[in-house]
Image: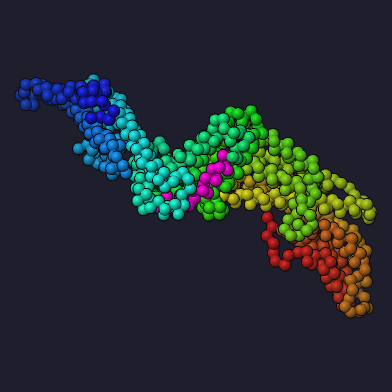
Amino acid sequence: MAVGSPSTTASPPSWVEALNSTRERAAAALATPLPAPLTPGSTAATSAAATRLPTLLVEHARLAAAHAYLVRLRAFDRAAAAAEDALLAAAAAASGSPPAAALLAAVSTAVELCTGTAESAIPGHPPGGGGAVSSITTAEAGGGSRPPPDVDLALDRHMDAAVDDLLRRTTALMKSHLSKALSELGWPATITSTAITKAGPSVIQSFRAAFADALALHRLMYRLHKKDRPSLDALLPIQIMADALIKRLRFHFLGSKPTNRLDKPEWLLQHISKLAKEHAEFIDGEVQDILDNNGFQDRDAATDFLQCLVMFARYKFQLDMPDLYTQPHLLLHTVSEFISFDRRSMQVGSLFSGQPGSRPWTADGFSKLAVLTVVANDSNTFRKWVGAEREAAREKFESIMDSDPWSSAFDDEMEEMTGLVPTKSAEAVMDLIGTITVLRAVQLDLLEEYLDRVRKAVNSYESTFLPLQSGVGSKRQYELIRYLCRAASSLAFVRDALLEMEESLFFIELSEFARERGEVEEPSESVFSRTIKVYGTVEARILDLIAEDCLREFVEAFWKYDKKSDWDSDDAGPSPTPPTAELSEAVGATLGFVAAVTSSLPGAARAHALRDLAGRVARHVWQRVVARRVFSPAGARQLRADVEHVWVRLFEGRLPTVPVEYR
């Protein structure tokens, strides 16, 4: 009896009648006697055979095809009837677990026949309904009495519908028994090892058996639907476990309950995190052990459990989106909470155990666990979010740049402790970038605008004329060099922050998402690669400008030393030789600028600028003094003392003793 048929007397579907009719007509054609024998070799005999033979071959193919369809149909109906009987017997079980082995075996046979994987389902035909069924074509059939062309589709639909109904009812039965076993353990309350011990061996054994049966059913369902539903679905028994929790979530976060507030998306996400931690011991322990012992070692129970809860969150926020569209500030707040939750859930272990980094997302984690896909996978929502984010970011950026952007974000003590010297604007811009993590276009616009502001400020500095040998001019020059140091420090801080961001697991996932959307062209290129390179180039230019201007101050104060001409004197003078008075004056005039560089640049940038300046000073002394004068032994000793004085006063202690990598 076919599944779903009320009795054996029910009329078969029209396509089955057509199939039977085709077989009967083909059989009748094959039974028609050939014309009376003629003289062998005669033209008439040859003509008759030539006319009759193709017809016989086509009719034979039709008969074989119709027979194969009917044999497969009857085999499936027998298997479906056996599965139906097993299901009824299991449902009638008074207590305990159903006779799951017999039920699953019967359902498995029906699934194999439906998917064409049963090796002996149709005698004489390969798995998959092959043979004459799949090989006959319209050209071979020649039209006429060939089985209807939609027979393949009709047969598949018939079997799919029957198997889907069978699996639906089997799932309901398995869910009932697993839910009963869970309730005996106290679920959905927290189940600790103490609770398991208190429940007793029979209760936990009943749970393990019901869970294993549901796993076997999941394997059957995946075999049937794997082309339509990839392995992103959570395992069936874990879905059943999560249903009880989701029922409570629906009560609190859907409808008119006070906990369902549009402006508080974090309440639901925080509750999901709380549930993950409460059930961590049971999920990571008992449930994972059952998976490992039943052929699912590659599945992570914690990930599947969290995925079920995240799926509800996605559903709830999809319902909220139309209302959020009209309130951009709430849309931005909601997405910000999505990002915050996804960053935490990227380390699944951190949600379950409170230990960050204990277990990262799997390769498909973004698709499974990211709430952000509510926005990312809907083009309309994504556009509205981008628009709201861009407008809010622009307003915030202008506010940052209007509020003393180039002053230090840290006090002197903090700078000395951390080795960082960011400006207020650099720190604020990176904070702003961090709040819009996944919008590459908005991030890059802000970074480009910030770089442009720095460029304009530097260009303005380069066009400023200050008279030399002027107290006011020298003070203003000092302030401008200090400003250049702050600008370079700002770029260095942003660049290093972007490099650190790129190395985070969450950003790697988002980069892959951007690459899939075509926002990143090169496989080896990250989202910020080009921006980081440009920032480094402009920073290097500013550092060169700093070294050049510091040298300019040194040269202007060095003119008296340049004119010194008594290097060939034989007067030994005192020992050790003190620095020349003219040189001490030049060093003193330059020292303030070197101190500004030292205090205003982070380590690598400071080393770059001061090494550049030291090289420029050395070249100047060589070209203007050493290469132009003749030295006596006493003059040579004096020159050596002067050079050491320059080094000690300007550079010693300010440069690292080991090479510093400079990007």
Residue 237 colored magenta? no
Of 534 and 336, the residue lying toward us: 336
Q: Is residue 33 above or below residue 353?
A: above
Q: Position of residue 164 (x, y in %)?
A: 34, 33
Quarter of the image with the C terminus in it:
bottom right
Residue 353 relative to residue 110: left or right: right
Specify the principal SS of the magenta part.
helix
Residue at position x 66%, y 38% in the image: 442
Of 252 and 381, the residue lying toward us: 252
Quarter of the image with the N terminus in it:
top left
Q: Position of residue 81 (x, y in %)?
A: 24, 33
Q: Position of residue 132 (x, y in %)?
A: 23, 32
Q: Can residue 361 be seen in this view?
A: no
Q: Is residue 281 visible?
A: yes
Residue at position x 69%, y 62% in the image: 660
Residue at position x 23%, y 25% in the image: 7
Residue 158 relative to residue 548: left or right: left
Of 535 and 403, the residue lying toward us: 403
Of 415 and 330, the residue lying toward us: 330
Q: Where is residue 578 in the image (x, y as percent from the top left)?
A: 89, 74
In this view, which residue lies farthest toward the front?
198
Q: What stretch is highlighted in magenta?
A: 268-289
Q: Where is residue 612, by image quadrant?
A: bottom right
Q: In this view, does 326 lie above or below 620?
A: above
Residue at position x 82%, y 53% in the image: 482
Residue 233 relative to residue 547: left or right: left
